[in-house]
Image (cartoon, grey):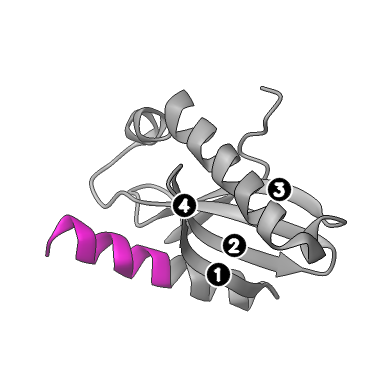
């Protein structure tokens, strides 16, 4: 399987997981010139910008390397573009989560809530 197909399968698994937890998927692979958000989901008054990392042969160090400061900054900038375009979400509590899919030693979908913020 190519990296793209592994990633797509992981994103689908993550989206299904979020839906099973009561989230509505607002968008998948939302792009701007600044970057991309894998999944945007809403539950009650919480809007989650989720980064999905499918790591079938990875570990925590791999995750840290893939979710470096540059990547986090792109996600933050892209989320701001989304909120400017879709102002109906501006009153929601904003959260940045990471969903790790298929990493050895953890659940099939490992959900890290509030994984990072703009102020770290």
Q: Residue 95 got which mark?
A: 3
7 within the magenta span:
yes
How far from the left and from the top, in percent, is residue 100? 44, 51
Q: What stretch is highlighted in magenta?
A: 1-12
Identify the residue position indicated by label 4 in the image. 32
Q: Residue 40 bears which disc, if any? A: 2
Residue 62 against residue 3 in the figure, above or below: above
Q: In this view, does 46 lie to the left or right of 56?
A: right
Give the x, y percent position of residue 7.
29, 60
Displayed quadrant of residue 64: top left
Task: Kindly state the secondary structure of the residue where label 2 is placed.
Answer: strand
Report how far apart the C-alphas of labels 2 and 4 lie in the structure. Answer: 14 Å
Q: How crowded is mark 3: few (under 14 residues within 10 Å), some or many (20 or more)?
A: some
- Which residue is at the front of the view, 56 or 19? 19
Q: Disc number at residue 27?
A: 1
Q: Quadrant of the C terminus?
A: top right
Label 1: few (<14), some (14–19) or many (≥20) C-alpha neighbours in 10 Å: some
Residue found at x 85% / y 63%: 45
**Residue situated in front as seen by the camera: 64 or 70:** 70
Measured Cα–Cα span from mark 1 to mark 3:
15 Å
Quarter placement of the N terminus: bottom left
Q: Which residue lies furthest to the left in this view?
A: 1
Asked if disc 3 and disc 4 are in contact, CB closer than 8 Å, the reply is: no
Main SS category, magenta section: helix
Tell me the SS state at disc 3.
strand
Dots 1, 3 in contact, CB < 8 A: no
């Amino acid at each position: 399987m190519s990296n793209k197909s592994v990633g797509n399968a992981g994103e689908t698994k993550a989206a299904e997981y979020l839906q099973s937890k009561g989230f509505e998927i607002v968008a998948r692979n939302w792009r701007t010139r600044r970057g991309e958000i894998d999944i945007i989901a809403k539950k009650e008054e919480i809007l989650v910008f989720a980064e999905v990392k499918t790591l079938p042969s990875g570990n925590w160090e791999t995750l840290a390397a893939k979710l470096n400061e540059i990547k986090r900054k792109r996600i933050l900038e892209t989320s701001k573009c989304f909120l400017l375009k879709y102002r109906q979400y501006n009153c929601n509590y904003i959260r940045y989560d990471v969903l790790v899919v298929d990493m050895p030693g953890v659940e099939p979908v490992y959900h890290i809530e509030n994984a990072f913020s703009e102020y770290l």
